[in-house]
Image: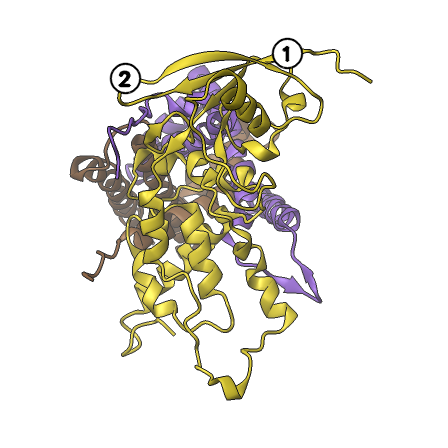
Amino acid sequence: MAAVKRSNAPIFWLLFGAGGMLSALLGTALVFITGLAVPLGWPLPADLLGYPRVLAFAQHWVGKGFLFIVIALFAWHAMHRILHSLHDIGVHNGALAKLVCYGGAALITVVAAAGLLSIGF
Amino acid sequence: MSRKAYLRPMEGWWRRDPFFVRYMVREATAVAVLVYTIVLTVGVVRLSQGEAAWNGWLQAMRSPGSLVLHAVLLVSMFVHAKSWFEIMPKTMPMIVIGGKRLAASTITRSGWAAAVVASIVLLSLAGWWRP
Amino acid sequence: MPDAVKSVEFDVLRYRPEQEDVPAWQRYAVPYSHDMSVLQALQHIKDELDGSLSFRWSCRMAICGSCGMMVNGKPALSCQTFVRDLLPGPIRIEALAHFPIERDLVVGVDGFVKKLEGIKPYLIPKEPRTLAQGEYLQTPEELEQIEQFSSCINCMLCYAACPQFGLNAEFTGPGVLALLHRYNADSRDGGRAQRMDVLNAEEGVWSCTAVGYCSEVCPKQVDPANAVNQNKVNSAKDYFLRFLSPKGARR
């Protein structure tokens, strides 16, 4: 019997799982802090996201690493799920769909990495 | 072995049962995760472009449109977390501790506990960290 | 106490390939009694109202897996579904979803059978024993690991529940993958390596998106969603660790 082709899904599934776990643990709090609390100035002070503080955070290897991991894993999680949702609504997961979705995640990863590196240490 | 077998179309399948609708809502939370990731990425890029650019991003984050958007993203992130911890037991092998099977509800509650702890740590660090 | 309801209406999706191209609904009025199952209603229709109605059934007690069909849009065993829970009607009866309809409520099962054969659904002993050596022993703890998955009656309700199978008939599917797990997880079995190809394929575990409806509808609480999704970890391990061991990560 001819061997059935092995799927490469595990790579993307692990990224999906890691990103899904991270966003399940921290996503709500992150959106709350950056998108609501600090911009409104309540219940966290508005100066929490002031330039000197955020710059220092992003220049520190812990902060830089945290930002990169959050952005990259969230992106790969989201794109993997979106790709499969496209399949669910009838859009075939052909080369174009995969290029747009996984390519999009790769783009976000690269842009974030470039930005974080150019901020320096 | 089919003698003119009839295959029913799948069009609109997820609208046929509330279970499927809830599944699609769960999957749709990925769009919110993507949107938020893009917001963060733009922020990182603006941060790398200097103080004026960063302040521009902060200004945009304070706009009414952004606040409404993030309120929606907040709900979606919560729905994601809830559905993630609910499906988590299905991804795990059978665990027997002291003769008793680890219940799905225990696994789900552990996930929630971890999320609460992680969120408290994050909020504390966000509030008190000084460079 | 005599039943207040005298008669219940059933809308059945008929399909006779020799006389029509497309299925069509037909309504029947069935005399009601408190204890009747949907299967009994169908048997009344066939015996008294319309002998041309075709449907599968056998044991009448939810163990043979023959009588699966859609009742009001949900996959169910007709022998285990009671009319009193579906009042006042009309009650919609349709062949199992996602399968090609051969005739009326009879679906084509060839694909399912072929997939089942493909996973080697039998014990391949880890250490073969002669008759003289006696039985293959197993502790209650080892049995617990596989018992629920061995309860599968091949009724295919999980396939009717699974939209990924509906969208792609090549997907191995919840029931067969649950049985694959039943053998891989059996302490007496040593055939894991021979079953990995099925797991690792795109049509294996990787077509599953954890909808979970399969486990909801399973009449035997097999929990196929669990069987499939925990094997994503096994398949991923096999994928990444295959380069480490000379024989591949299949032990």
Q: Is residue A117 left or right of residue C26?
A: left
Q: Is residue C176 left or right of residue B105?
A: left
What's the distance in space between the residues labelled 2 and 1, CA to CA? 30 Å
The chain in brown? A
Q: Which residue is mark 1?
A: C7
Q: How is the image coloured?
A: by chain
The chain in purple? B
x, y (%) of residue B48? 30, 40
Q: Secondary structure at mark 2?
A: loop
**Residue A109 occupies quadrant:** top left
Q: What's the mark number on residue B9?
A: none
Quarter placement of the N terminus of chain C: top right
Q: Which residue is mark 2?
A: C19
The chain in yellow? C
Q: Is residue C87 left or right of residue A84?
A: right
Quarter placement of the C terminus of chain C: bottom left
The answer, for residue B130, to whether it is visible in the render is no
Name the amino acid, label 2.
Gln
User: Furthest residue to the bottom?
Assistant: C132
Q: Secondary structure at mark 1?
A: strand
The chain identifier of the residue carrying mark 1 reads C
Do the residues marked 2 and 1 share a common chain?
yes
Question: How many neighbours does mark 2 have within 10 angstroms: few (below 14), some (14-19), or many (20 or more)?
Answer: few
| Residue at image location 59% in from the left, 74% down from the top | C138
